[in-house]
Amino acid sequence: MHSCPLCKETNSRFYFEDHRRQYYQCLNCDLVFVPPEMRLDAKAEKSMYDLHENRPDDPGYRRFLSRVATPLLERISPDSEGLDFGCGPGPTLSLMLEEAGHTMALYDVYYYPEQKVLEKQYDFVTATEVIEHLYQPDVVWQQWLNLVKPGGWLGLMTKQVKGVEAFAGWHYKNDITHVCFYSRQTFQYLAERDKLQLEFIGNDVILLRKPQ
């Protein structure tokens, strides 16, 4: 039996298998995950990330990120201070938020590994296309909550699981750096457990507010 990397329960079940990996589902929090022995090592993982070509001057990439930026900007106060966690090699969301008048810090385990930015709290934290990559989502989730001030926001982007039939043909699982897959039920579980206000925006944006 595989322990869930998010909630640590051991009551997981086999969910799906393709030609590269097996996937299990936690019966407690609904997370679908790849077992540890089927993940990439750090060197192979970074080599995949190095292939990404997301750039701040790409209008398509900005449109993509506006799906989280726009609703977040509607909710945060002017002159807020934020952290873009997992910003990648070409930080763009942070620039968009700075252009809107906010102050941004950057963190990425491979490209911006500045530990000092993790030693304070922020009005908001963003993590776009990050949470599905995490080998220890339980640890990072708690880290995010600690980084957000009371009353602050956590803005996430990730595609969500919609059932095993859809999963079978889902392109999102084919990226071998994606190891955890979340459903609405998973985020509802986390929000209830951690007493967070939860909003779903479209198909892939999740906003959570920490209590005052």
Image (tube, rainbow, N blue to C red):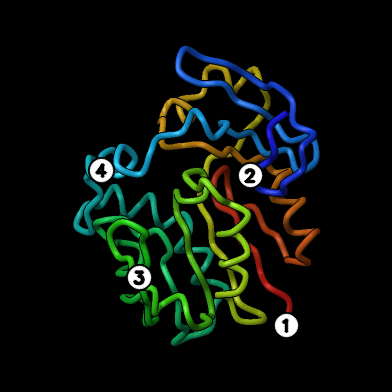
Q: Which residue was labeled with disc 2?
A: 5
Q: Do the residues under discs 2 and 1 have CB atoms within 8 angstroms? A: no
- Residue 146 horizontal/vertical position (percent): 60, 74
Q: Do the residues under discs 1 and 3 have CB atoms within 8 angstroms? A: no
Q: Amino acid at mark 4?
A: His
Identify the mark nearer the N-term, 1 or 3: 3
Identify the mark nearer the N-term, 2 or 4: 2
Q: Amino acid at mark 3?
A: Leu
Q: Looking at the image, which residue is at 68% across and 26% down? A: 163
Residue 111 placement, left or right of 127: left
Residue 127 placement, left or right of 180: left
Q: Which residue was labeled with disc 1?
A: 212
Q: Which residue was labeled with disc 4?
A: 52
- Residue 93 horizontal/vertical position (percent): 36, 63
Location of the N terminus by quadrant is: top right
Q: Which residue was labeled with disc 3?
A: 106
Name the one closer to the observer, 61 or 50. 50
- Residue 172 horizontal/vertical position (percent): 47, 31
Identify the mark nearer the N-term, 3 or 4: 4
